Amino acid sequence: MLDRIAGALVPGGDLVLVHWRQWPAEAPADAAAVHARVLADDRFDTLVEHTDQQFLLHVVRRR
């Protein structure tokens, strides 16, 4: 999925990731794992990071 997202964004394009921490047990991945994969990807630079007990929010920019 990350390849599709990165391919859809032009260099300089921004992606907003927001996940509620109360991720359903039946979901294929939890919110923190999804964010960690995007943040670790060399194709993106983190612009904004907000985490609290309710949700995770990141804005990343395509390199």
Image: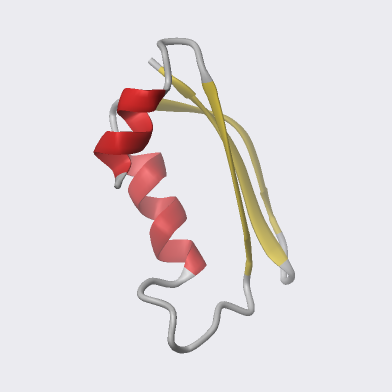
Q: Is residue 54 left or right of residue 63?
A: right
Can you give x and y, in whole percent of width and height, for residue 61 in the image? 50, 22
Can you give x and y, in whole percent of width and height, for residue 24 in the image? 54, 83
* Above-or-below relation of 13 to 20: above
Q: Residue furthest top?
A: 11
Residue found at x 37% / y 35% = 5
Coloring scheme used: secondary structure
Q: Is residue 53 left or right of residue 9?
A: right
- In the figure, residue 14 lies in which quadrant? top right
Q: Nearer the viewer, residue 47 or 25?
A: 25
Residue found at x 41% / y 58% = 34
Can you give x and y, in whole percent of width and height, for residue 26 in the image? 43, 87
The image quadrant where one finds the C terminus is: top left
Residue found at x 40% / y 53% = 36
Residue found at x 38% / y 43% = 38
* Above-or-below relation of 57 to 9: below
Q: Is residue 15 left or right of residue 39?
A: right
